[in-house]
Image (tube, helix red, strand yellow):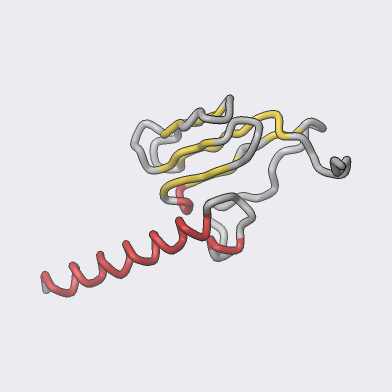
Amino acid sequence: MKDSSKKKLTRNRCQCDECKDIIESTHVHDYVTCKCGAIAVDGGLEYIRRVGQLHLMVEMNEYDEGEKDENVVNKSNKDVSETPVRGTRRNAHVLRRLKKRNKRRRLSKE
């Protein structure tokens, strides 16, 4: 039985804060990256998936009632793993690993 309280996704898109590119996934297997390659969108109107540097991402999803997505990941104090976007736990883990690696490299150069 389908839950009628869920909003239907009409636009699956976001904006890269680095290159200001607005990218949109229009169908299920439509994997789209921004010009600089920092972020990517996938899933079309079936599901929401975000890949890349989530701190550079501004959500711009729209739903059937014309409501904008309130889940803005960019410039928030929330931990990335708390956001309900699909795939963010894996991405948060990757970001933590990259931060540690960059810190080690910085320390080794000094």
- For residue 97, side relative to residue 10 (left or right): left
Q: Position of residue 63 (x, y in %)?
A: 74, 34
Q: Position of residue 88 (x, y in %)?
A: 52, 55
Numbered label tally = 0
Q: Residue furthest left?
A: 109
User: In the figure, 32 relative to 70: above or below?
Assistant: above
User: In the figure, 18 relative to 55: above or below?
Assistant: above
Task: Give me the residue at 39% from left, 60% from top.
Answer: 95
Q: Residue furthest top?
A: 26
Task: Give me the residue at 53% from left, 52% from top.
Answer: 87
User: In the figure, 80 relative to 48: above or below?
Assistant: below
> In the figure, residue 101 lies in which quadrant?
bottom left
Q: Position of residue 44 (x, y in %)?
A: 59, 30
- For residue 23, side relative to residue 109 (left or right): right
Q: Which of the pair 40/18 is nearer the observer?
A: 40
Q: Position of residue 10 (x, y in %)?
A: 70, 29
Quadrant of the image containing the C terminus: bottom left
Task: Give me the residue at 58% from left, 26% from top.
Answer: 27
> In the figure, residue 24 lies in which quadrant?
top right
- For residue 73, side relative to residue 16 (left or right): right
> In the figure, residue 39 lies in which quadrant?
top left
- For residue 102, side relative to residue 16 (left or right): left
Task: Give me the residue at 42% from left, 47% from top.
Answer: 52
Quadrant of the image containing the N terminus: top right
Q: Which of the pair 110/23 is nearer the observer?
A: 23
